[in-house]
Amino acid sequence: MIRSEVLGELKDCAAGLVALAELLASRRVGTKAIALALPSAIEACGGVAVAAEKLAADVLRTAGEHLDATSEIRAVFDRAIASVRTLEREVTASGSAPADARSRLVLERTAHDASVHVAAVLFVAEMFTAASAPRTVSIRVADVLGFGPALADGPHVIRATLDAPPEPFATTDARLLRALVELGVQLVAASGVSAPHVAVTSRGSGAHVRVGTPPEPATPAFAAVARRASSRPPPAQGTVLAVRRLPWSEHTHHLARAAAIMTGADLLVDASGRLLTVVFS
């Protein structure tokens, strides 16, 4: 069982890392403000490392029989703890504040690296929380995928086109459904798919979610329409799935597969890594 208080402890400590990364990234923030933030950042680093170790034990027990997944879970947590310890050393070496612009840039990158690695840990922990104690309901897949947090455009956000008609339903935990599809978008993007596409279709009484490359135009005329459409404003909410880009490895699909199996879903990954399919009952 993944203890909610341990998960909450890590979230609270991780907020300090995010705050430092955002502070350093703002060019309107001066040296004095950074100097005031560094002591609490050191404290946050220590808290994250301790909380991450406790949470790792919980997640590993939860995924116990899935050996490929447990190996990668340990690796995700180890990378996060190492990145936080690196940030702790950089902050300590900075003294009262970064000495110059170059030092500040190095510290900014280190803080961002630590915050995204910890975000990956939280993503994994919440996915396995949903898989181990699912709130199973019959839910319209489009309702789960069509709405989500607003994420600003940038290199750390992936926007997948979404084709989710209202008909397909799935009997599963909505949190897990969203997590598996978001992770699928990140994995196919990491495999070189520059514009991931999520297609949802009915499969018996359940749903079939395909994450991969956009469908090929059927005819030259259709291709011309598609080219004209590409020059239009971005699609409205509900036709795009925005996902934060996190630092995964080539073995991350083991995590997704284990979480899916725990709730009776099926997950397949093409050998190229450019196609991931999840089947929900």
Image (spheres, grey):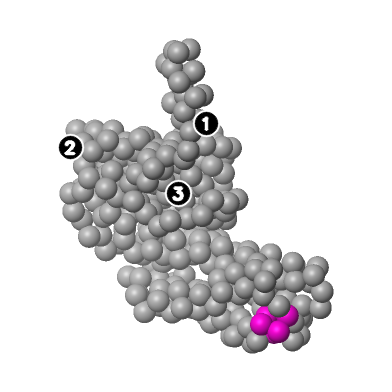
Name the spot of residue 255 as percent of width and height, x first: 44, 53
Q: Quadrant of residue 174?
A: bottom left
Name the spot of residue 77 as percent of width and height, x first: 53, 66
Q: Earlier in the sequence, mark 2 or mark 1?
A: 2
Q: Amino acid at mark 1?
A: Ser
Residue on which the image places disc 1: 231
Residue on which the image places disc 3: 242
Residue nearest the observer in this picture, 159 or 83? 159
Q: What residue do we see at 65% from left, 86% from top?
A: 36
Determine crowd level at label 2: few under 14, some 14-19, many 20+ residues with C-alpha closer than 10 A: few
Residue 159 located within the stretch drawn in magenta? no
Determine crowd level at label 1: few under 14, some 14-19, many 20+ residues with C-alpha closer than 10 A: few
Mark 2–mark 3 distance (CA, rounded to whole Å): 27 Å
Mark 3–mark 1 distance (CA, rounded to whole Å): 19 Å
Name the spot of residue 276 as percent of width and height, x first: 43, 38
Name the spot of residue 136 as percent of width and height, x first: 20, 56
Tell me the element at label 3. strand
From the image, state whether disc 3 or disc 1 is nearer to you: 1
Q: Which residues are magenta?
A: 31-35
Q: Quadrant of residue 219?
A: top left
Q: Which mark is residue 205?
A: 2
Give the main secondary structure, helix, strand or loop, of the magenta stretch: helix
Tell me the element at label 1. loop
Q: What residue do we see at 66% from left, 82% from top?
A: 33
Determine crowd level at label 3: few under 14, some 14-19, many 20+ residues with C-alpha closer than 10 A: many
From the image, state whether disc 2 or disc 3 is nearer to you: 3
